[in-house]
Image (cartoon, rainbow, N blue to C red):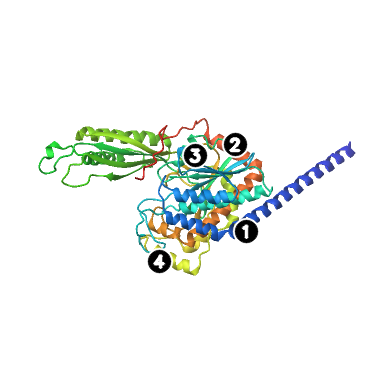
Amino acid sequence: MKMYTVKLLVFYLCMLSAFLGMAQKKGAVNVALKNQAIADIQSKYEAYRKIALDIWGFAEVGYKEEKSSALLQQTLTDNGFTVEKGVAGLPTAFIATYGNGQPVIAILAEFDALPGLSQEAIPEKKSIANQSGGHGCGHNLFGTASAAAGIEIKKLIEQKKLSGTIRVYGCPAEEGGSGKVFLVRAGLFNEVDVAIHWHPGDNNSVTMKPALANKSAKFRFHGLSAHASASPEKGRSALDAVEAMDNMVNMMREHVPQETRIHYVITNGGKAPNVVPDFAEVYYYVRHPQREEVVKIFDRVVKAAQGAALGTETTVDYEIIGGTHDLLLNQTLAEAMQLNLEKVGGVQLTIAEIEFGKKLQTTLGFATPSLESAALVKPLKLEGPSGGGSTDVGDVSYTVPTVGMSAATWIPGTPAHSWQAVACGGTEIGTKGMMAAAKTMALTAIDLFTTPALIEKAKQEFIKDKGDYQYKPLLGDIKPALNYRD
């Protein structure tokens, strides 16, 4: 009996030793693959830098990103991807695919600019002649880094060091157009196991802050034109209706949950003061951490529009432009990405870039972090839901387990959607941060391809956190508002 026990113990020790040996070997292989990925991506820095700066120069707004999308598509095609363009009824959307079988890992790419943010790559406010848009959210960097990460994974699959499928999703009109929502609605993520994304920013961190759900629309009022001085009684002002609506919504702010964000711009208020405007338009965003609240508050905004029309004897109609979910975070994937971000590290600024940064920080008008923080990686930490922005990545995150990060592509303290962000994105400050993101995403993808248990654990967390919720797009069954920037 004792001899049997000893033999059994020896057997289990041998099995444990073999298991540890395989794990150690696998770990060594992963380290080698990751080191290769880092070196390969860095070796293509000049090529990726040029792509990013070309897109920065195109500065094309949502659903108009013809040159930007074409450049990324050509880059992926030249590197062996099969590209399907115009997916989900979006002319500038695409899916680039390489490999076959499971797992299917998606990397999201964006490339739209913002209107009204034309800016040279200098630390003082100066717009570029004959250009209105600017990459105030750094999507020129976003799309390029995602393509770079996808290309590296494709190389490893081609070399048979990984097996499965890599997809790069070209996602237009993130800024208000909800491009990814239409991709999700069309079922284009149904076969995906995990989605990876990133976003330019002023720090290096893995995303653990929920986004705000968002619903937006353009409200269009129709009245009667007349001479504003000679016969004002014959006119019914559409602009009066817009202003009445805005007044009611602004009074409503006292009576909505405090986490709510409501913004609007009058996109058409008439053409001449002496003509009663027979048409006026106002563009509204409604945001809240919970999608159910967004729907309720948006419906109240619609009632304000209807009331304004009634009171001014005008008529109103509205067009839904966008609608996005909050962001379903995945701790399992975040922890894996955090280790890879720490391996890659942050952004080292040169003396010239530090001087650029100091000048730019003086234009911000508030206290800013130290420039040295661009080189640091923030610890992984779940942040509160209040404040923040919205993203159509939220809809992807309610479809497949999703993970994202931020890289320091802007001088610390720089807010998004600012001319300062545009300026940084046109310099090597931006492109160096872009490379940190590309490397981190590639390393995270390597973990997913080589560790099935990581995907399974992420899926279990996804199912648990999603609960019994059945995804339903907030924008309903509308067609894409392809001309929403006109």
The crowding category of the residue bearing disc 1, from other C-alpha atoms within 10 Å (few below 14, some 14 to 19, many at least 20), is: few
Asked if the residue under mark 2 is in contact with the one under mark 1, i.e. CB atoms within 8 Å, the reply is no
Q: Give the residue pinned by disc 3.
A: 87
- Between marks 1 and 3 in the image, the one whose residue lies nearer the viewer: 3
Q: Which amino acid type corresponds to the residue marked 2 in the rendered image?
A: Gln
Q: Is residue 303 left or right of residue 177?
A: left
Q: Is residue 359 left or right of residue 393?
A: left
Q: Give the residue pinned by disc 1.
A: 39
Ranked by sequence position, the earlier of labels 1 and 2 is: 1
Q: Secondary structure at mark 4?
A: helix
- Quadrant of the frame with the N terminus: top right
Q: Position of residue 209 (x, y in %)?
A: 48, 46
Q: Secondary structure at mark 3?
A: helix
Front position in the image: 37 or 211 = 37
Ranked by sequence position, the earlier of labels 3 and 2 is: 3
State the CA–CA distance, disc 1 to disc 2: 34 Å
Q: Secondary structure at mark 1?
A: helix
Asked if the residue under mark 4 is in contact with the one under mark 3, i.e. CB atoms within 8 Å, the reply is no
State the CA–CA distance, disc 3 to disc 2: 30 Å
Residue at image position (44%, 56%) is 56
Asked if the residue under mark 3 is in contact with the one under mark 1, i.e. CB atoms within 8 Å, the reply is no
Q: Which amino acid type corresponds to the residue marked 1 in the rendered image?
A: Ala
The label shown at residue 395 is: none
Q: Which amino acid type corresponds to the residue marked 3 in the rendered image?
A: Val
Q: Secondary structure at mark 2?
A: helix
